[in-house]
Amino acid sequence: MAPSTRTSVRYSTYSMTPSVAPTVATTDSAVAEIRDIEKGLDRMENKALTQQRVTLSEEKVANMSKLALGAKLDRALGRRMSSQDAVMRPRKQSIVVISEKEKI
């Protein structure tokens, strides 16, 4: 592999470490399409609802988790077939001894 002739260093947006990978050049039509998509996403966002978002305290998050777990347990117990529980009964002894010598 031939050494790179690049003189600039591109930094990764994720790790901020230099990379010598070539940057992909985008065309004007691609940039325009990306801007159109961005404008469409901005129109879809409801700014009034975004301002109403609430952040719960850790205590409330823990309580909500416990309530959710309790609700899941109630639903699971409601689906359980309690009348179908196994009953262990003593079995009759049915031991049949077959000797190979007797058959001959």
Image (cartoon, grey):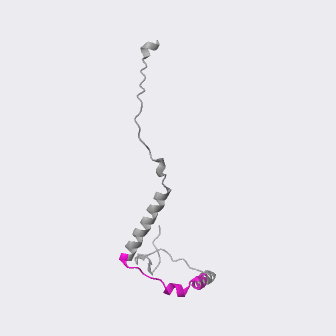
Is most of the magenta stretch helix, strand or loop?
A: helix
Q: Residue at x 50, y 75 (%)?
A: 22
Choose between 92 and 103: the one closer to the eye: 92
Q: Quadrant of residue 93?
A: top left
Residue 51 screen position, x and y as percent: 49, 87
Q: Residue at x 41, y 72 (%)?
A: 64
Total count of labels: 0
Q: In the displayed image of the protein, which residue is found farthest to the right?
A: 29
In this view, 71 is above or below 95: below
**35 in the magenta segment:** no
Residue 73 screen position, x and y as percent: 44, 61
**46 in the magenta segment:** yes
Residue 92 screen position, x and y as percent: 42, 30
Q: In the displayed image of the protein, which residue is found farthest to the left?
A: 59
Choose between 68 and 35: the one closer to the eye: 68
Q: Residue at x 57, y 85 (%)?
A: 42
In this view, 55 is above or below 74: below
Residue 57 screen position, x and y as percent: 37, 79
Give the residues in magenta. 37-59
Choose between 50 and 30: the one closer to the eye: 50
In this view, 86 is above or below 6: above
Q: Quadrant of residue 99?
A: top left
